[in-house]
Structure formats: C-alpha cells, structure tokens
Image (tube, rainbow, N blue to C red):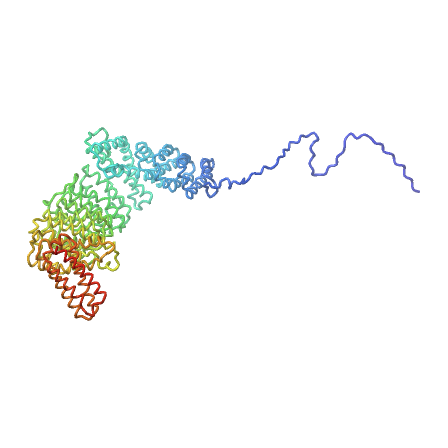
Amino acid sequence: MVRSKAPAKKQQKKGIDFKKIKRKLGRKLPPPKNATNTEIKSKAIILPEQSVAAEKSGLATSKKGLTLKELLPQTSHHNAKVRKDALYGIKDLFKNHPEELQSHKYAIIQKLRERISDDDKLVRDVFYQLFDIDIFPLCKEDNQGLMVSLLMPYIFSAMAHSAIDVRLMAFKFFHLVVEFYPPTFSLDAEKILENYKDIIQKNHFYVEDKSKLKVALSGLSHCLSVLPCDESDTKSQKKGPSQNETLLTYEQDATKDCVRYAHVYQRLKEVVAVLINCFQDFIPLIHAPRGFDAHSFDCIQHILRSIGYAIKFSIRRHKQRQTAWRPASEEVTLMILDQDIASMLLKKLLGSFPLDPENNLYGKGDDKYFKLNSVLTEIFLEVSEWSHLPTDLSNRYLEFIENTLLGKITRSIRLRKDIHEKTLLALLPFLPKLILRVDRDWRDNLLEAFTITFSDCKPESKLKLACISTVRDMIIPNGDILYPNASDPTVHYYQVAWVNKLPSLLNQLGNEHPVSTQVVLQLLLDLGRVGCLNASPTCEDDIRNFFSLCQGEGDVPGGPFASLPREAQELALCFLYYFTTDKFSSPMMKAIVSCCLYPQLEPAVLYRIVEILHTAYRAGYIQITDHFSFLITLIARFKVVPEKLQSSIECNERETYCGTFKEVTKLVCSCLSEMGDSSLVLQIVEKVLLEQIVLKPALDNGCAILRMICVLDSTPTTLSERSVTTLSEFLPGYMINIVNCIPEDKENSYLYIQTCLYYLVPCYFLFNRSSKLTEQVLIRMRSMISENTKALESVQDRERGRNSLNMIQCIISVILLMHNDVKVRKIISSFKPEIDLILQNVITLQSSRSTSLTVEGKHMMKIAGERLRIASKSLLA
C-alpha cells in the first residue's frame, strides 16, 4: 500500500539579507557599485597628412630617411653603433645632397669635431673618411682658415689623450688637415712639433706594429715638407699683387717669416735628435739578412725625409739671415752652428751609409735599400755644402752618385726606371756646386757621368728638363755658382758638348712637347746673351731644320717652329738674333725664308721674323747681300693665296691673305729705306728686282716688287735704260691683269677704283719719273690693240675673237683709269697722239664686218670707243 505523500509545507516569504550571485569560472569580478569610472572618452582628431614621410617632403634625407638635423645629434649617442651609423648617414647625405654641406658646414664641423677623440675605433675611422672624401674636397674654395681653427683645439686635445690609438688618429687627422690647408702647420708649429716629438719618443707602444709609428712619421714628414726650404718655396706661398716688390718690402717679408718661425728652431733641433735615435733603432733590422717589411721601410724613409727637410729649412734660415744682413742671434741652426747635432748626423746617420745587408753600394737586389741610400745622399749633399766631412765618407757618397748617374746600380739590382729617374731628379740640383767642391779626378768623373745621363734620357722626360737646368747652372754664371771659363779645357769641352746637344733636342721634341721646347729655347737665348753659343757646324743644321724642313724649291711642310705656341716662337726668334752673330749663313737664310713662306704661319710671327732679321742686320750680324736676298725672295715667292685654298677660299679670307702680304710689303719697303743711300741700294738690287720682273710674277707679287723699286728710285728716275725697257714690256700686261683680276663693281665704283689704285700707284710713280717709260708703255698698248684688231678681222673662230675683244676692252679700261687720275692725266697729255691712234683702231674695229665680232661685241666696242673719245678730247683741253 502506498503511503500517501505528506502535504507540502507552505514556504513563507522571508527577508533576504544577501543576494547570492552565481558566478561562472574564469570571469572577472564586476566592479563595485561604488567604484568611480575614470575612463575618458574623446572623439578622434583627424588631421590631413599625418605621416612622417610627408613631413620630410622637400628635405634632404639619407637612405634611411633621416635629415641632417636628426643625424647630427646621433653622432653623440652613447651607443657606438648609433654614432657610426649617424656618420655613415651624413656621408650618404653629402654624397647625394652636397648643398647641405655648403649651407651648414661650420655647424657640422662644430658638432663632428668631437668624434676625433671617440673611444671607438670604427667611429674614428668613419669620421676620418667623412672628412677625407666628402667634407674637405667640397670645401676647397671656402674659408679654409676658419674651418681649421674650429678643428685645431680638438686635435690638440686628442694628441694628448691617454689612449695611444686616439693619439695616433689625432696625428693622422692633422696630417689630413695639413694636406687640405698647408699653412695650418706654421700657425702652431712649435706646439705641433712638441707633440710629434712626444709620440715618436714613446715608440715602445708599437714595437711590434710599425704601422702605428708610420702614422706619426708620415705626418711629421709632410709637415716639415711645407716649411719654406728655399726661395722658390717662399715665392710660391706668397701671392703678392705685384712682382715689382721693393727691397724694403722684401726685407719686411723676410723679417715676418723669421719671426713666425723664431721658436721653431730649438724645437726642430730636439725633433731631429729624436729622429736620429729612432733611426738607430732600425739599424739592426736594416742589416739583418732577412731585411725588413714594408712598414719598417716606410718608417725609415719618413725619418730620413724629415731630417732632410729640417736641414734644408735650417740652411735656408741661415741664407736668409745673410741676405737680409741680419746679425746672428743666439738661435742656432741645425747644421751650421750646432755642433751636437752635427756630430749626431755624422756618426749616427751619415756614417751608416750605405744601408744594405752586405754593406756595399749595389745592394742585393732590393730597391728599398737604393731608395734609402738616395735619401741619405740628399742629406749628405745638403750637409757637405756647409760642413767638411771625412774623405773616406765623402768618397762613398760620390761613388754612389757616379754609379747612379751612369745607371750601374740600375742594371745591377734591376731597378725600375721610374725609381731611378726620381732619384736623379733629386740629385741633379746639387751637382753644379758639388763639382766645384770635389777634386779634379772626381770632377772629371762626375762631368762624364752627367753627360751620359743628359744624352741617354728621353727628350720629353722630366729628367731631361732637370739636366737642362743643371746645364744652365754649370755654364751661365750666377750668384752662387761660377764655373771656370775656357781656361779650363776639360770643363770647356763638356760645356761645348752640352750646348751642341740643345739644337738637335729641339727637333726631337718637335711641336708635341711645347713646354720642354720652351725650356730649351730659353736656355739657348740665355746662352746667347752671355756669349756662350759656341755651336758646331751640325748645330746650324739642326737650327735650320727647326725653322724649316725645306731642302729645295717649292712648298714643303715647315719645321717645328711654325706650330709652336706664340710664346715659344718669340723665344726662338730672340735666340735667332744672337745666333746670327757668327752663324748666319746663306743656307740658314734660305731656311728662314722657307719658314716665312709656310702657309700656316701666323702673320704676327712673320712680321716679327722680318723685324728680328733687320735688327740683326743693323747690328752687323748679317751681310747686306744676304739681307737683300732674304727680303727680295720673301716678296717674290710669297703666295698671297695658297694653291690648296685657291679653289675654295672665300672672299673675306682672300682679303685677309692680301692684307697680310700688304703689311709684309710695307715692312720690307721700310727696311730697304733704312739700309743706306737709296740710289746706292737701288744699284745693288736693281738687277735682281728686274730679273724677278722678267719672270712675270703674280699680280700681288709684281705690285710689291714695283713698290720696292719706287721706294729706292727718285725723280727723275735713276733706273738704267735696260731696266726702263724691261719695265715697258712688263707694265702693259701687269696693268691689263689688274683690270682682268678685279671685277668692276658698278654699284660701288669708288671701292673698285680704290682697289685698282693700290696696284696702279707704283706704275704712276714710275710714269711720273720717266716720260720715256710712259711713252713706251702707251706705244706697247697701241701695238697690242692693233694686233688684236687685225686678229678679229682675220680670225673666224669666235672663241679667239672673244679673247681679242676682251684684250682691247681691258686696254681701254686701263687708259680710262689713268685718265681718271689728275696727275697721270697731265703726264699722258704729252702723248695724246698715241691715244688717238688707239682710238682710231677702235673706230676701225666698229665698222669691221668680221664674223667673229658679234652684235653684242660691236655694241660694247661702240661704248668703249665713245668713252675713249671723250677722254681724248679732255686731254686736248
């Protein structure tokens, strides 16, 4: 039986104290009801173009999109990589936008200079490259002094840095600054030398790594090289406004120069002492069988170079004091007064020669030893001029110099030619003074060795120029060097040999090396001025070939002279004046004439040649017959228009050529008028001039010859009857040629008449001076008209008839031109019958029934006859 359920109790509603909240796992607690809502809500602010790239549009940026303003602060970042990347970014920016550097260069330098002392090697290297490749090359034209002044305090600070690598970078960077702006060294020379001395003394830091020592030594060598070691260095550094400086100005400049380096000499002496001791440290390495590496070689070479520059500067200082008449102060120069340094140089430096493992002059096949011995020899040559050295030591150096000149060392160690040539270029300037100091045996050996070097080197090489400079010093006296004259036969023999090589050298150089040619010409000119041109017969042949390669008649290519620059040509012509003193033969004159006839020769040079030769004639260097021959040949053979150009030449070019010849004619006539009594001169040249007339020269040449005759002739004429007859046969054809060659310009008749007048004036002068000549010319013209008239009547060929008609018209035109001149009209009035006979022949021709005379021809003859009839009537009046 199922129990019935008990009735459910009725639940009573009770008050709820806490509401139970069902929570799900993982959910956060809701915020309390009394929590304050701190959330801030705002609407988005929308601005146009908010991107960073858009903000930098138009600005110069690096590859990474950074501007200069962003990159500069990063160069001071605490992280080395950031600093390095910033420097690379600036480098890239300058490469693509160089204007950024020009606009902000001083601000850039002020910021970047801090990196000189950077403690990271890579940052320092990038900093150096940035200035070396980008900043300094782009700022060459700017205010370099201001840029350097911004850098120097930081460079000096880095030179005193505790880290040796930072110090070495400071010296390396200073070397770069001096290359960029050389005066940097002279501004703080004493302080810089002190730093160099300190860094070189502490070479124990880099006993194993010679590359570090090389950094300091190379910088020191370069700095000392910019010191004014001779007068040429001083002049090159000064850019004065005028070359004509007064003596007082020079003394003031010398005084300023002395003051600027007043405190350098003592410091320089200390540096040289340190360098000599440093050199001694390398002696065991030099004489070691294995030799030395490249860095050690560079270090030794820089040491020797630095010592050499210091000695040169010291000697220059001593010479400057002597020149300026200044009393010697308590300062001492390195070699001349300081015995301590002199002793060190002799024992520890010069006495080490020669430098090679086997201790001989030829070495063992390595050119490094030869280079070092060459620098040591330069130091010896500087020192030996001011200090007496032991004989055995001097002989070792003299043997090296002789063998170098002869090329024995070059052959023994297979030395490269460029190294050998560079060594000779350094040694040759010392040779003139050295030869004067040594004994006779060494003098003869050195003279012979130099002569061989002078002969063997290439004409266009720098070595040849250096030899020419040495020849100048050993022949031409100057303040420092005075060689014995012909009293010493050995020296005189070599001097003559050197001089005789110079003319052939001109032809070897040709026109392809104008600078070298100019140097040779300058020496020849100077030799001529001092009377040292003792040339051999072969020398004259070389001079002839230099001016003209012409060996016979006709046009041939000119010599090198014609193609040289104007300045070199002027030197050659001035030299030619002195060469004429005793070597101006007839073949030489022919060569000069051929040169003058060279078509490409500039007119100004042609005029100058005539002036030079006439000056030489007046000085008595040229025979009168040779001078006449030159002037007449020049006029007779001159081609007003070269044959190669006649077909294509334009009118204005033709006028240019004609103008040149007119000036030449004027110049020649002027020379003839200055050569003495005109009648006597005419007697000498009359036959030659008439011989040229007989050859029927071209119109311009014939006019020039007639003008030469007129200049020398007088009124009445002094010409012989034979000459008058010759002229009477030449002048009709010459005057007809004038009308033929100069076309009549009806639009500008004045210009036509003036052009004809230039060629007719010589004839008019001759007519005025000789009535017989005038009569014979008119008779000859009448005869020519009569002959051509008969030819027209008898000849049926129209071509030949046209030629005869043209001849008659030309003769009539000549008579009319003569009639137009008032003075000539009076002259020919006395010979009116001849003109009437000419008119009668023309009238006869008009009525002729010859078939060769066309209607047009008859009409032209009618007009010409009418003009001639009017002219004849005016003569009657």
- Which residue ends up furthest to the right in the rendered image? 1
Asked if residue 870 lies left or right of residue 185, the reply is left
Can I make out residue 630 in this image? Answer: no
Asked if residue 451 lies left or right of residue 223, the reply is left
Depth check, front residue: 239 or 385 = 239
Depth check, front residue: 710 or 163 = 710
**Residue 374 appears at what percent x and percent y?**
25, 44
Depth check, front residue: 731 or 825 = 825
Q: Quadrant of residue 229?
A: top left
Depth check, front residue: 41 or 219 = 41
Q: Name the quadrant of the C terminus.
A: bottom left
Q: Quadrant of residue 14?
A: top right
Q: Quadrant of residue 740?
A: bottom left
**Residue 323 appears at what percent x and percent y?**
19, 34
Asked if residue 249 lies left or right of residue 172, the reply is left
**Residue 691 appears at what percent x and percent y?**
11, 59
Q: Name the quadrant of the N terminus.
A: top right
User: How many numbered dots are placed on residues in this image?
Assistant: 0
Residue at image position (12%, 43%) is 484
Q: Where 698 falls versus 574 (above or below)? A: below
**Residue 825 appears at what percent x and percent y?**
13, 54
Residue at image position (22%, 40%) is 380
Q: Where 847 falls versus 220 (above or below)? A: below
Can I make out residue 654 in this image? Answer: yes
